[in-house]
Image (tube, rainbow, N blue to C red):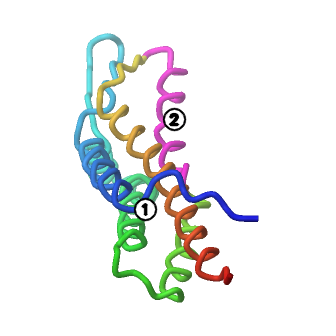
Amino acid sequence: MSRKPPFISPQPLRWLLLFTSILLIAGFFTPMLTLTKLMVVSHSFSIMTGIEQLWLEGHIVLFFVVACFSVLLPLAKIILLFNLLHPNTNNPQHRKKLLHLMHEYGRWAMLDVMVVAVLIVTVKLGALASIEIHPGLYLFGAAVLLIMIITHQVVATLEYDEHSSQTTF
């Protein structure tokens, strides 16, 4: 029984990953939310300005949690995906090591989205505050979803390639 080839070939995945990288970086810096307290005080912030504010207010643990899971880990996953999609990455042991790293990271894949969701729910529950969503949230969300889709396709491609190379006629 032969396995179906992956849906997307590596070259278009590289371009999609480049586009996703641009979306992610734009999502970091584009305003994501505006918080309005008592209909008088409004604060707009992006992921980066939110992280900066956590640092300035002395919330060091929260600063590191949000910075790691919303910025560093998505960037690390993109770098890992670029390495896996690089045409010169033919060493099977190197690919297995990178895939292992990807699976380890997969456990934390949705934590960055959860951080934003918890923030929104917390603010929505406040009787004295309202929230307005801006394009940064959509850019960041689209980038996270595309990273998940690309990861699935990269794993399918590598598994197909590995299975094809092991099959002898």
Tell me which residue sits at (29%, 42%) in the image: 27
Quadrant in the picture for the C terminus: bottom right
Tell me which residue sits at (36%, 33%) in the image: 137
Along the line of sight, which residue is nearer the eye, 56 or 149?
149
Check disc 1 and give the amino acid type: Leu
Spatial separation of the CA atoms under disc 2 and disc 1: 17 Å
Question: In this figure, what is the number of numbered marks?
Answer: 2
Q: Is residue 57 visible?
A: no
Q: Residue 28 at what x, y percent from top left?
A: 28, 46
Residue lying farthest to the top in this orientation: 39
Q: Is residue 138 above or below residue 160?
A: above
Residue that badge 1 annotates: 73
Residue that badge 2 annotates: 117
Q: Quadrant of residue 78?
A: bottom left
Q: Is residue 28 left or right of residue 150?
A: left
Tell me which residue sits at (67%, 80%) in the image: 167
Q: Is residue 74 above or below residue 128?
A: below
Check disc 2 and give the amino acid type: Ala
Q: Quadrant of residue 134?
A: top left
Q: Secondary structure beneath disc 2?
A: helix
> Which residues fall within the magenta stretch?
109-128
Tell me which residue sits at (56%, 81%) in the image: 96
Label 2 vs 1, first from the N-terminus: 1
Q: Residue 131 at what x, y percent from top left?
A: 39, 20
Along the line of sight, which residue is nearer the eye, 152 or 31?
152
